[in-house]
Image (cartoon, helix red, strand yellow):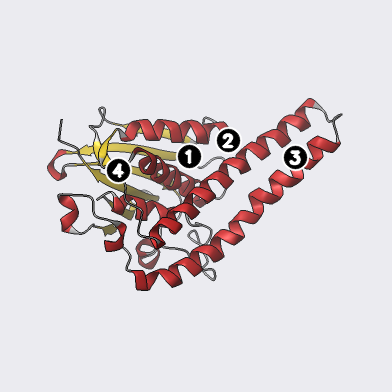
Amino acid sequence: MLDRKPDPRAAATVEPTRDIIDANDLRPVREAFLAILSHELRTPITTIYAGSSVLARRPTLSPRATRTLANDISAEAARLYDLVEDLLVLARLERHVLDPIDEPVLVQRALETTVRTVSEHFGDGLVDRLREDEAPPVHGDATYVEQACRNLLMAAIRFAGGDADRRLALRIKTAPSAAEVRVAVQDRGPSLAEDELAGAFDLPNPSATGRLAGAGVGPFVCRQLVEAMGGRVWARNVPGGVVERGFALRIDERG
């Protein structure tokens, strides 16, 4: 199991991202990030351009064909939005301005928004929400928490490889002894090797094969956001043929 823990200093306050990634390490990260991003941008841009062109030039399309094209454009526009948001995170990392607001955030609200968005584009049957009682507020930035949730869930969908029969389990758990709220996405599929678990939140190697090869930049951005908010991420194999990736944020006890 991989368990990335933040700097102990983060227990008292949210540290600037300059403590997470040293400036000297950003150039290779930027180059790898942009290489992956430039590849990923082509699909949504091509789909949006082609689909909108067909709708504009062929007004006599059947309602079914029109609806299909409109849904494809909507889904790829949402994907493009996420990619732009991830690119902005990299830009803030480079300028050392990824300083999240430290405010009480209800993780379940961010997850509700995320699941609703996913359901609109992939159907209602893809994600099973499994959770305990309502989780308490955590230290975080509402915008960044939602982006981390979205990236984590979308990465799991990409892991599933478009398999409509492979359902995902989304869990929220409060851990009072650790003073944190944990969010995890479980995917029933082939287990990951130790080196894959260790790299589950890294930028993927372009020459990599296997389930992580098409992970994209989402997991990397998720880790940066979570650690900037004083949290941690992990990846592990769960008995029964399940792969789990998740993050935890500190409970806000300021009342």
Between label 4 and label 3, give the one nearer the viewer: 4
Cα distance in 3D space between marks 4 and 1: 34 Å
Q: To which residue does mark 3 refer?
A: 52
Local crowd at mark 2 within 10 Å, few (<14), some, or many (≥20)? some
| Residue located 47% across and 52% down the image | 88
Cβ atoms at labels 2 and 1 below 8 Å apart:
no
Q: In this view, does 252 lie to the left or right of 91?
A: left
Residue 140 appears in which quarter of the rendering?
A: top left
Between label 2 and label 4, give the one nearer the viewer: 4
| Residue located 48% across and 39% down the image | 167
Find numbered disc 4 in the image and state the secondary structure of the residue it sits on: loop
Which amino acid type is marked by label 3? Ser
Q: Is residue 50 left or right of residue 150?
A: right
Cα distance in 3D space between marks 3 and 2: 18 Å
Which amino acid type is marked by label 4? Ile
Mark before the other along the chain sequence, 4 or 3: 3
| Residue located 44% across and 40% down the image | 168
Q: Can residue 200 be spotted in the picture?
A: no
Between label 3 and label 2, give the one nearer the viewer: 3
Cα distance in 3D space between marks 3 and 1: 31 Å
| Residue located 15% across and 35% down the image | 253
Mark before the other along the chain sequence, 3 or 2: 3
Q: To which residue does mark 2 refer?
A: 121
Cα distance in 3D space between marks 4 and 3: 38 Å
**Whole-percent x and y of residue 74?**
63, 37
Q: Is residue 111 above or below residue 9?
A: above
**Whole-percent x and y of residue 187?**
43, 46
Quarter of the image that includes the C terminus: top left
